Image: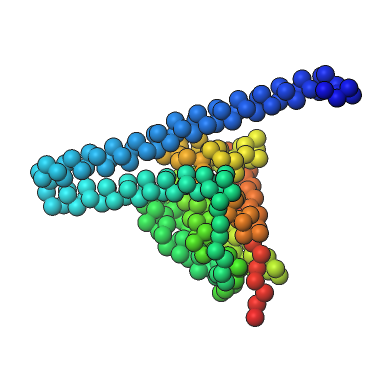
Amino acid sequence: MDENSDPDDLLANERAARIEAERASHLKDEFLATLGHELRNPLNAILGWARLLELGRLSPEEAHGGAQTIVRNVRALSQIVNDVLDVSGMVSGKTRIDPEETDVCEVIEAALENLKPTLQAKAIELHKHLGVATCLVFGDPHRLQQIMWNLLSNAVKFTPRRGRVAVDLECTGATCRIAVSDTGDGIPAELLPFVFDRFRQPQGAKTTPNRGLGLGLAIVKQLVELHGGNVAVASGGAGQGATFTVLLPRLASL
């Protein structure tokens, strides 16, 4: 022990380390419980409809509906597994990107097209403002698509029926700025610093069904940083919606 060490400081540091270890353990336990819940729901739906199809007593219309339900839940399971694998790769430092010249406008349009059925189902009003026809970055198209999908699906998830989601793109100088905002649950000020932590679910964690694993925003942060950018969040508080802003280095125009 350093002779100049203050016993009170050492005790405080030890206490802080213990509290942090307990917090990490609690988050892990909560994550495992949530993972079990998120896996069980689609598995139950798949098993239930598979048994009905096996019995062969469904009408053609019912069988078609059952098949669609199975496909939808298999996709949900696939997304859960992909998120867990992504986070595992990030923790071990194995996540890589394959960058190439990519148009962010095309990435945004593709993500919105994939989300169109969900937007329509919840009657959510979409506001899209792309300030330029083309905005080029040196990035991995697949990973950039993943960033946009996670941010947009997060906004849709926490926005009530007939709410509003907006996407704004600005390309000025050497920076590409993407903002995704919503009129959803919002984020209390005390939780804002933890939004991008793994396993955190700050928005509607106790009231929103199908809340997810709390991995999507952690994945967004890691992928944005791998592209040399940064991501931030702002919210007026509970019930005031949230805005996520991504800044990426822009390729110089030819």
Left or right, residue 38 beside residue 29: left
Picture coordinates of residue 35, whole percent (x, y)? 43, 36
Question: Residue 69: x percent and y percent?
Answer: 27, 48
Most distant residue in the left direction? 57
| Residue 106 at least partly seen | yes
Q: Quadrant of residue 4?
A: top right
User: Which residue ends up furthest to the right in the rendered image?
Assistant: 4
Q: Nearer the viewer, residue 204 or 91?
A: 91
In the rendered image, which quarter contains the C terminus?
A: bottom right
Q: Position of residue 245 (x, y in %)?
A: 62, 55
Residue pictured at 44% horizontal, 30% vertical: 33
Q: State whether residue 135 appears in this view.
A: no
* 55, above or below 126, in the image: above
Q: In the rendered image of this protein, does residue 247 appear above or below residue 63?
A: below
22 up-or-down from 132: above or below? above
Which residue occupies the foreground of this view, 195 or 20? 20
Residue 41: quadrant of the picture: top left
Residue at horizontal 62%, vertical 60%? 227
Q: Quadrant of the N terminus?
A: top right
Nearest the viewer among 135 and 93 is 93
Describe residue 107's horizontal placement relative to residue 24 as left or right: left
x 66%, y 64%: residue: 249
Q: Residue at x 52, y 32 (%)?
A: 28
Quarter of the image where one finds residue 97: bottom right
Above or below: residue 101 compared with residue 229: below
